[in-house]
Amino acid sequence: MTEMTLIEALKKLALITKKGLDELIHIPDNASGPITIGEAIKEIQDHDSDISETDDYIIGSDGIWKTGEDGSEIVYQIKESE
């Protein structure tokens, strides 16, 4: 568990995935289709009012979890290959 911004967490996830910034991910509970890590970073940069806000994240080969008082919740999950 490390404190970092969501963009930093996405960049670290890109480093450990096979396709880097082109790795497909999806946001749980979001009806839209998968996006690449690069697209997710761009969306955060374009739309997030405070991109410097930090949280505690756990980064693994299958996604990013945000940790908090209630445990952890998945923020981004690597899309399974079909």
Image (cartoon, rainbow, N blue to C red):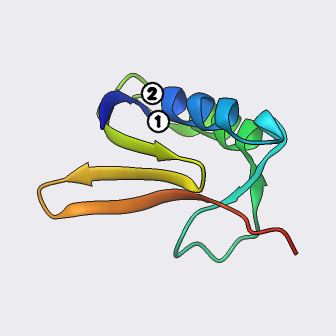
- Residue 70 image position (x, y, % from top left): 15, 64
Left or right of 16 in this view: 51: left
Q: Which residue is mark 2?
A: 51
Dots 2, 1 in contact, CB < 8 A:
yes
The N terminus: image quadrant = top left
How far apart are the alpha carbons under marks 2 and 1? 8 Å
Residue 32 % position (x, y): 71, 71
The crowd level at tag 1 (other Cα within 10 Å; few <14, some 14-19, many 20+) is many
Q: Is residue 70 left or right of residue 18?
A: left
Determine whether the residue tagged by mark 2 lies in a helix, strand or loop.
Answer: loop
Quadrant location of residue 22? top right
What amino acid is at disc 1?
A: Leu
User: Which residue, given by chain and number where applicable, does mark 1 sit on?
Assistant: 6
Residue at 67%, 29% in the rendered image: 15
Q: Secondary structure at mark 1?
A: helix
Hey, what amino acid is under mark 2?
Answer: Ile
